[in-house]
Image (cartoon, helix red, strand yellow):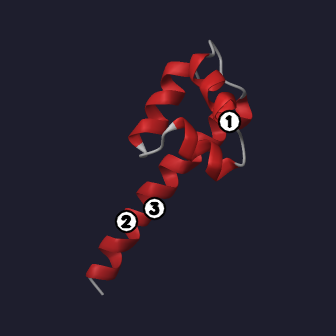
């Protein structure tokens, strides 16, 4: 994953560098470095993908609850 792809997922999920850093217990500069990287560390790449999945799962559960 490139830094640009990382940054897009971050923004698509409603996070800023600061808010994502706070959620993960990191400083904003670490997140900024990910956004600039040619290749993001696989740990951070997997974590940002998990945030996207978490958001989709939450939305799905809302729909399921609606039809109960």
Which element type, helix, strand or loop, lies under badge 3? helix
Q: Are marks 1 and 3 in contact (CB under 8 Å)?
A: no
Q: Position of residue 26 (x, y in %)?
A: 72, 42
Q: Residue at x 66, y 28 (%)?
A: 29
Q: Position of residue 17 (x, y in %)?
A: 55, 36
Separation of disc 1 and disc 3 at Cα? 20 Å
Residue topped by disc 1: 44
- Which callout, 1 or 3, points to the residue nearer the camera? 1
Label 2 packing within 10 angstroms: few (<14), some (14-19), many (20+): few
Residue topped by disc 3: 57
- In the image, 24 versus 59, the foreground residue is 24
Label 1 packing within 10 angstroms: few (<14), some (14-19), many (20+): some
Query: What is the number of the mark on residue 60?
Result: 2
Among the two numbered marks 2 and 1 on one chain, the one whose residue lies closer to the N terminus: 1
37 to the left or right of 5: right
Q: Are marks 3 and 2 in contact (CB under 8 Å)?
A: yes
Q: Does 40 appear above or below 48? A: above
- In the image, 8 versus 64, the foreground residue is 8
52 to the left or right of 12: right
Q: Position of residue 27 (x, y in %)?
A: 70, 38
């Amino acid at each position: 994953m490139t830094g640009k792809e990382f940054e897009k997922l971050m923004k698509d999920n409603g996070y800023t560098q600061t808010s994502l850093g706070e959620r993960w217990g990191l400083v904003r500069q670490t997140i900024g470095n990910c956004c600039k990287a040619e290749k993001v560390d696989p740990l951070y790449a997997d974590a940002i993908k998990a945030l996207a999945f978490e958001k989709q799962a939450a939305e799905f559960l809302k729909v399921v609850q609606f039809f109960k």
